[in-house]
Image (cartoon, rainbow, N blue to C red):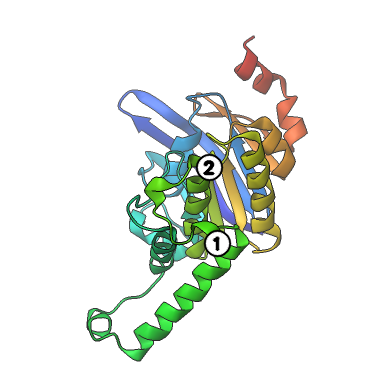
Amino acid sequence: MELLRVEQLTKRFGGLTAVDDVSFGVREGEIYTIIGPNGAGKTTIFNLVSLIYPASAGRIVWRGEDLTALAPDRVVSRGIGRTFQNIELFEHATVLQNLLIGCHAQAQSNFIAEMLFLPSVRRREVEHRRRVEKIIDFLDLQVHRDSRVAGLPYGVRKVVELARALCAQPRLLLLDEPSSGLNVEETDDMAYWIQDIRDLLGITVLMVEHDMSLVSRVSDRVLAVNYGKVLAEGSPSEVQSHPDVIAAYLGD
């Protein structure tokens, strides 16, 4: 069953076509990765799927619903979470506080209930804290839970951003270059977590990644793009051996 279907997606910035007639589908329970050289349009595709950019043409269909005209702030409530290539955290808040913000992205708030801190609000806050503690344990963040983000190493911040996205309880998780800036050991840890997110938490993963060893290790299917166009789709080995993909990375 396909959770997400992208149909003839196109994005133009003035006279530049950054994404050109791209179509693909992400099946429930798989890890699907988009690869390509720098400037290929990978992150633009992500920004279109998460509705940060409006599409110039095409459709984004989520579980049968056309999301193309939806407001960007409604994406999380549909069950789509994401991380960013450039980490987007509240640096002067603690890890725990950042994760609780992820929980509140799904909350249905009522001003009067919040102001009076009614029992329903208290129950919700307790449930949010339980959810956060489970994610902290899952990603081995116990030692950092009360630390300010600004004082954490880059690799830990990447994990915190991943944790915050998981706290929103997504059915589809978009990971934008999760290994970017990580050392070999941290990349190995990230590979295990990506697989566990799918296998243990039951979350489908759509990923943009440049580290081909990580791509080969975790991906079920791969889409290669260049200059905004699809080059190939298939298993990691099939795509990496495709002549058009080799030419895009190495030149003709």
Number of numbered markers: 2
| 28 left or right, relative to 118 | right
The residue wearing badge 1 is 142
Q: Nearer the viewer, residue 58 or 25?
A: 25
Place of residue 200 in the rendered image (x, y in percent of width and height, measured from the top left): 69, 63
Place of residue 209 in the rendered image (x, y in percent of width and height, measured from the top left): 58, 36
> Looking at the picture, does residue 9 appear above or below residue 98?
above
Q: Nearer the viewer, residue 49 or 218?
A: 218
Place of residue 151 in the rendered image (x, y in percent of width and height, measured from the top left): 40, 47
Q: Nearer the viewer, residue 63 or 104?
A: 104
Mark 2 against mark 1, which lies toward the viewer?
1
**Which residue shows up at 46% across the image and 32% down it?**
19
> Looking at the picture, does residue 115 appear above or below residue 50?
below
SS at badge 2: helix
**Which residue shows up at 57% across the image and 36% down it?**
182
Q: Kindly identify the amino acid type of the residue bearing the numbered disc 2.
A: Gly
**Which residue shows up at 76% across the image and 31% down it?**
238
Which quadrant is home to the C terminus? top right
Q: Nearer the viewer, residue 169 or 149?
A: 149
Residue lying furthest top in this view? 252
SS at badge 1: helix
Residue lying furthest bottom in this view? 119
CA separation in Å, label 2 and label 1? 15 Å
> Looking at the picture, does residue 213 appear above or below residue 130?
above
Place of residue 34 in the rendered image (x, y in percent of width and height, measured from the top left): 59, 37
Which quadrant is home to the N terminus? bottom right
The residue wearing badge 2 is 155
Residue 82 in view (yes/no): no
Q: Kindly identify the amino acid type of the residue bearing the numbered disc 1.
A: Gln
**Which residue shows up at 50% across the image and 46% down it?**
158
Quick one: label 2, few (<14), some, or many (20+) residues within 10 Å?
A: some
